[in-house]
Image (spheres, grey):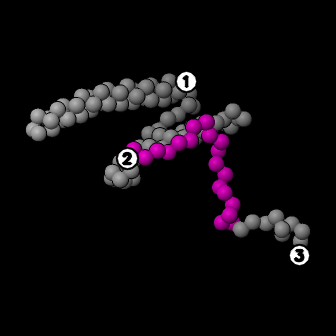
Amino acid sequence: MSYRLQYARRPDSITPRKPPARVDEWARLNRPGLYSDAFVRVFVEDTTRGRSGRDPELVLQIADCTNTINLEFSLETAQLRENSLYKVDTLLGRLRRFRDGLAAEAQLADERVLDNS
């Protein structure tokens, strides 16, 4: 038997290579016990060591219990880099406004519950 055989691994034990990540997160969007599979997944490849000739891998995936959206981003040209940042800034701004509106309506719902008691 070859001495190298002792270093061999079964194919199912080999971890797939992943690009190094600057950001690599996954989070559930619902509290435990409420609904199920809603999540957000974010991934930004770290290209510090150089990845010549291609965009880094960029993932923004948002899912509710039945639907998933994958937003595309590119850093290929200056115009696309600017647009990608604009897209994220627009999302953040609208999410903040949505949260403010939701909080106001949640407060009114709490007040209605108290008034009906």
Please name whichever residue, 6 or 107, is drawn nearer the observer in this view of the structure: 107
> Which residue, as the protein is rendered here, is positioned at the far bottom?
1
Q: Which mark is residue 78?
A: 1
Q: Tell me the quarter of the image containing the N terminus.
A: bottom right
The residue under label 1 is which amino acid type?
Answer: Ala
Helix, strand or loop status at disc 1: helix
Relative to 84, is 71 above or below? below
At x 11%, y 39%, the residue is 117
Q: Amino acid at mark 2?
A: Arg
Magenta residues (range): 11-30
Residue 45, quarter of the rendered image: top right
Q: Residues within 10 Å of mark 3 (few under 14, many from 20)?
A: few
| Place of residue 40 in the rendered image (x, y in percent of width and height, measured from the top left) | 44, 43
Neighbor class of circle 1 (other Cα within 10 Å; few <14, some 14-19, many 20+) is few
Circle number at residue 31: 2
Q: Secondary structure at mark 2?
A: loop
The answer to whether residue 56 of the structure is visible from this angle is no
Residue pictured at 56% horizontal, 41% vertical:
24
Quadrant for residue 91, please give it: top left
| Residue 95 drawn in magenta | no
Mark 1 and mark 2 lie on one chain; the one further toward the N terminus is 2
Q: Which residue is mark 3?
A: 1
Mark closer to the observer (1, 2): 2
As drawn, is 25 to the left or to the right of 6? left
Of marks 3 and 1, the one in the foreground:
3
Question: In 3D space, how far apart are the residues under numbered discs 3 and 1 (Cα atoms)?
Answer: 57 Å
Residue 103 found in image quarter = top left
Q: Residue at x 69, y 33 (%)?
A: 48
